[in-house]
Image (cartoon, helix red, strand yellow):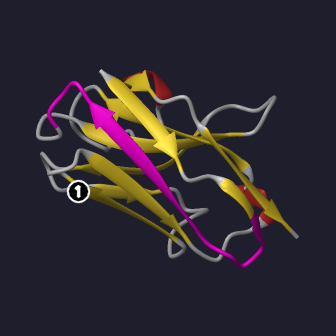
Amino acid sequence: VQLQASGGGLVQAGGFLRLSCAASGFSFDDYAIGWFRQVPGQERLGVSCISKSDGSIYYADSVKGRFTISSDNAKNMVYLQMNSLKPEDTAVYHCARESLGACGNYYYAPEFDYWGQGTLVTVSS
C-alpha cells in the first residue's frame, strides 16, 4: 500500500491549489481516503474525507465552502481543491487511507492506517 501526496506550493491569500493523492496497492471500493494537515509542533488535524463504499464526504468546519474533495476511482486518485486560501491553511498536508471504509471519524488519525509523506502548502498574507 502506498499513498503519494503532491501539489503543494506557495500561494497568496485568496489563491487556490489542487492537491493530488495517488494511491496504489488496494481497492478504492473498500477504503476511504482522508486529508489531514499538520503545522510543526501541533497535532495532525482532519480536513476532509471521501468514501466510495458509502458515498460519504466530510469536511472540517474550517474548510467548508472553500475546499472540495473528489476522486477518480479509475486512476486511484483523490484530489483536494483548495480555494480562497488563508494564511491559517499553511501546513503540511497528508493523505491517508481510512481502515474501516467510512469517513464518520475523518478527524481521528489513529483510524487511518497508511499515510503519504505529505506536501507543504504555504499561504502568504
Q: Quadrant of the C terminus?
A: bottom right
Left or right: 83 in relation to 26? right
- Where is 123 relative to 73, above or below? below
- Where is 62 relative to 29, above or below? below
**SS for tag 1?**
strand
Residue at 32 percent across and 32 percent down: it is: 98
Residue sitting at the far right: 125
Residue at 55 percent across and 62 percent down: it is: 61
- Where is 29 relative to 115, above or below? below
Is residue 19 a member of the stretch shown in magenta? yes
Q: Splitting the image into 4 quarters, where does residue 111 fall? A: top left
**How many labels sit on residues?**
1
Residue 26 in the image: state x and y as whole percent: 19, 27
Left or right: 114 in relation to 42? left
Residue 30 in the image: state x and y as whole percent: 13, 34
Q: Amino acid at mark 1?
A: Asp
Residue 6 in the image: state x and y as whole percent: 52, 46
Q: Quadrant of the N terminus?
A: top left
Q: Which residues are magenta?
A: 11-27
Left or right: 61 in relation to 100? right
Residue at 34 percent across and 31 percent down: it is: 97
Is residue 15 a member of the stretch shown in magenta? yes
Of residue 30 and residue 100, the one placed in the foreground of this image is: 30
Please name the residue that numbered disc 1 is placed on.
Answer: 72
Residue 81 in the image: state x and y as whole percent: 48, 66
Within 10 angstroms of label 1, few (less than 14), some, or many (20 or more) residues?
A: few
